[in-house]
Image (tube, helix red, strand yellow):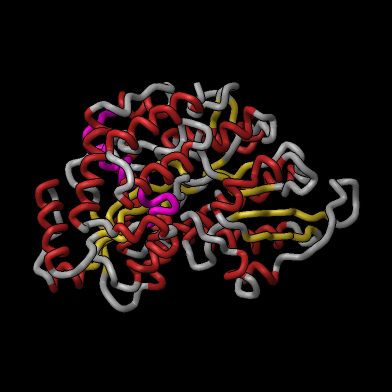
Amino acid sequence: MLMARRRARLLAAALAGTLSLSALAACGESDGGSGGSQTLRLWHYEAPDSAMGKAWDQAVAEFKKKHPDVKVEFEAKGFEQIQKTAPQVLNSDEAPDLLEYNKGNATTGQLSKQGLLTDLTDVAKKRGWDKAIPPTVATTSQYSASGVMGSGSWYGVPNYAEYTMVYYNKDLFEKHDVEVPTTVDELEQALAAFKDAGLTPFANGGAEYPAQQYLYQLALTQADRSWVKSFQMGGKTDFSDAAWTYAADTFADWVDKGYIAKSSSGVKAEDAGVSFMQGKHPMFFSGSWWFGRFHTEVKNFVWDTFMWPESELTLGSGGNLWVVPDGAKNKELAYDFIDITLEKQIQNTLGNAGGVPVAADTSAITDARAKKLIEEYDALAENDGLAFYPDWPANGFYDSLASEVQKLITQSAEPGDVLKSLQAEYDDNVLK
């Protein structure tokens, strides 16, 4: 996610004049490497106070030290903005030299299939990216000729990882005498207790990725690795099976009981996260991309995390990718920047700020909560517990999921009808 990665923040306005990157960014046209001043045009959508934002800020500063004659033209983009416009932009003269992009069949896979991205296979071997990045993370770097991830050529480079978890407000749990749930029954009891106390238990964003990730996590509690592979990379899933049926029925039941607000159908991801930060909800199921921000911004209560009870699988993967457009004017400079983001000092910054680094010096991660985050990810990766994201397998499926899950939130369609619609959208657009 579209993951995400987090993903739906339109950062350009918020970042204007505030990023330390702005001191490093400069306008100017690249000469394409023919001599004179060069410009590295860079896009990403990480908030400046997020772990990734801090790390990429540092990487830009380091890049300037190593390339004092190169201008860096940084543009802050929103996740949704890039998600919707990348195919058009990358097929034009406006393409940057390097940008952060969502991983998966329907995004990076589709752009690679269309010939819009640079094949990085030889560069990855030459620069050692294929050795530096763990195999579980590199899965989302490689795509077949048909755009299916997991094998084939390298079209992107992740330099962090991510996964989903339940963020919870420890103060509210203690106030209402609710224990951290370790089973599904205990989770249901916790949801009921908070609702009885007048609280909507889960923060949710129905307009963007959070709602569909709740649905997918519920399905994962009833699924196994073969189910995930068939859905994500096999081009086949049965939306009337036990896993999807349980997910849709349970989600609808939670809306009916008030565990998820009907009013959340139009809420964006940013607003869902902010509502949790404001203490309005005791829980928020989302990704590690929020971790650094919560660590920095939440001052009015104590928070922590727990994994979804009784589930061996959760949403997650390598992080979003650095991709180099096929039409980029300064590819070697883009490769140099990717190298820097994989350096220990940048990776350590990422880890200590609440990210999940892929090449850090673990002894340099000093924050206790950050250590826990990384240890949980390592355990998931070791046990093959990362199940990617629900929008990946099919073109346009992110929007299909958002639209259909909104119907569950507004109670304008029955779970079975929602699943039938998803089946049709999946079958018509799945990448094989």
Q: Is residue 361 visible?
A: no
**From the viewer's perspective, is 178 left or right of 301?**
left
Residue 318 in which image quadrant? top left
Range shown magenta: 205-225
Label count reads 0
Query: Residue 416 location, x and y as percent?
Result: 28, 34
In this rendered view, identify the residue nearer to me: 206 or 237: 206
Image point (44%, 24%), residue name? 427
Q: Position of residue 298 (x, y in %)?
A: 35, 73
Which residue is located at x 25 percent, y 41 percent?
A: 218
Query: 84 above or below 190?
Result: above
Left or right: 116 in relation to 124: right
The residue most toward the right is 35
Q: Residue furthest bottom?
A: 300
Q: Is residue 214 left or right of residue 289?
A: left
Seen from the viewer's position, the closer of residues 221 and 338 is 221
Residue 190 image point, x, y percent:
13, 58
- Camera sees residue 61: yes
Residue displayed at 61% across by 57% down: 77
Along the line of sight, the residue nearer the viewer: 29 or 235: 235
Q: Residue at x 46, y 35 (%)?
A: 392
Q: Main secondary structure of the magenta part?
A: helix
Q: Is residue 23 above or below residue 266?
A: below
Q: Position of residue 333 (x, y in %)?
A: 73, 48
Residue 258, magenta (yes or no): no
Taking depth in this image into account, of 207 and 289 the one nearest to the observer is 207
